Image (cartoon, rainbow, N blue to C red):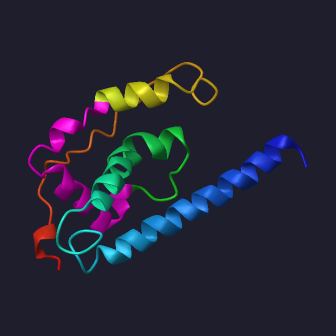
Amino acid sequence: MVFAEFFFLIFIQAVEKLYEALDKCEGILSHQRYLCGNQVTEADIRLFVTLIRFDEVYAVHFKCNRKLLREYPNLFNYTKDVFQIPGMSSTVNMEHIKKHYYGSHPSINPFGIIPRGPNIDYASPHDRETVG
């Protein structure tokens, strides 16, 4: 097997595991506001730092675009909910996040091109207060 074929198989398996985990979280969040119930925990913060980067970076840069965060209604609204916790939005600097990812992997992005979009408004209304 050629190295590229081996790498591709590893990549496909990793992407499958990623989407299995996202699907599981989508299901959990369909009946409770946060991952572990109705209070924010460290698990929510850890998931948030991944989700806030998903459509802006991971879907494009790491080719994880089978389904975007915006296509998961519970995960997307959950991300907005956590983002809107007082003090949380100040921890997110999307320009910095994008410059880091798109500029630090020359083997993936040799020209360092930083996409302009999708510029998601995480401060927009969500429906999470009705869940749980």
Q: Position of residue 27 (x, y in %)?
A: 36, 77
Q: Is 13 on the left-hand or right-hand side of 76?
A: right
Where 76 falls versus 35 (above or below)? above
| Magenta part of the chain | 69-94
Where 71 falls versus 83 (above or below)? below
Pick the quarter of the image with the C terminus. Answer: bottom left
Q: Position of residue 94 (x, y in %)?
A: 29, 33
Quarter where residue 47 is shown:
bottom left
Q: Is residue 3 magenta?
A: no
User: Which residue corresponds to the image point at 52% horizontal and 60% vertical from the top-left?
Assistant: 18
Q: Main secondary structure of the magenta part?
A: helix
User: Which residue corresponds to the image point at 75% horizontal and 46% vertical from the top-left?
Assistant: 7
Tally of numbered discs: 0
Q: Position of residue 91 (x, y in %)?
A: 22, 37
Quarter where residue 80 is shown:
bottom left
User: Which residue corresponds to the image point at 67% horizontal and 56% vertical from the top-left?
Assistant: 12
In front here: 70 or 39? 39
Q: Position of residue 102 (x, y in %)?
A: 47, 28
